[in-house]
Image (cartoon, rainbow, N blue to C red):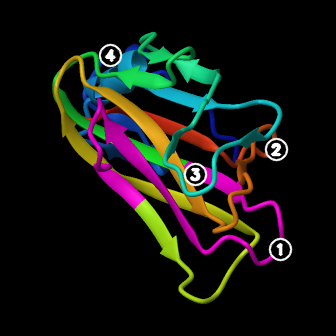
């Protein structure tokens, strides 16, 4: 059986069609409205980006896969919250220490404005173990105010002052940030 994409703006009612003549009720087509004006996904379509060892660094996602409200700035790498509400974010970042067995601490975090602590973070501390590459992912919701700026930062401690890098341009894209308003 073939399935087709349902355009929320064309539903015209409060029910969605279902298989075998049934229906899904209680789902409003308005629920899709926030994504259509606030949804975005930022990536880097080519090349790796080096950053300083043991330094928290902003991730330079210079490409938009989509930006439904023109809220992501490819020059500052920040998403500007268009309206106060609750937002869902998901991110993944592929980081390499560049040399086998050199990365001992890794983290990626979602920062609001100039805050020194992330509001959402994933961290790995290898203690005495060391790794060459790490994929760091997290998803969650945040209550944000209109005008807040959201951006992703990364950290890798090689402990040798050489530069690690985050990967851009893989297929499929493994370094990205995506988000939208949910209420």
Q: Which residues are magenta?
A: 92-121
Q: Earlier in the sequence, mark 2 or mark 1?
A: 1
Distance (Cα) linking label 3 and label 4: 36 Å
Q: Which residue is mark 3?
A: 92
Mark 4 or mark 1, whichever is nearer to me: 1
> Which residue is at a point 68% across and 80% down the rendered structure image?
130
The single residue placed furthest to the top in the displayed view is: 70
Q: Earlier in the sequence, mark 4 or mark 1?
A: 4
Name the side, left or right, on which 125 lies relative to 158: left
Q: Which mark is residue 170?
A: 2
Q: Which mark is residue 12?
A: 4
Distance (Cα) linking label 4 and label 2: 40 Å
Pinpoint residue 25: horizontal percent, then vertical percent: 25, 42
For label 3, the SS is strand
For label 1, the SS is loop
Q: Residues within 10 Å of mark 3 (few under 14, many from 20)?
A: many
């Amino acid at each position: 059986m073939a399935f087709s994409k349902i355009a929320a703006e064309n539903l015209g009612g409060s029910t969605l069609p279902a298989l075998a003549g049934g229906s899904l009720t209680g789902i409003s087509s308005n629920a899709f409205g926030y994504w259509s004006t606030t949804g975005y996904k930022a990536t880097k379509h080519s090349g790796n980006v080096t950053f300083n060892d043991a330094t928290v660094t902003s991730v330079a996602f210079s490409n938009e896969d989509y930006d439904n409200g023109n809220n992501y700035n490819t020059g500052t790498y920040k998403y500007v919250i268009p309206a106060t509400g609750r937002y869902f974010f998901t991110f993944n970042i592929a980081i390499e220490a560049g040399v086998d067995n050199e990365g001992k601490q890794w983290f990626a975090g979602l920062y609001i404005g100039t805050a020194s602590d992330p509001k959402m973070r994933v961290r790995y501390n290898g203690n005495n173990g060391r790794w060459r590459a790490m994929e760091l992912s997290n998803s969650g919701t945040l209550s944000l105010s209109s005008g807040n700026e959201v951006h992703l930062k990364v950290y890798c401690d090689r402990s040798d002052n050489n530069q690690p890098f985050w990967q851009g341009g893989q297929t499929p894209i493994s370094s990205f940030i995506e988000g939208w308003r949910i209420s």
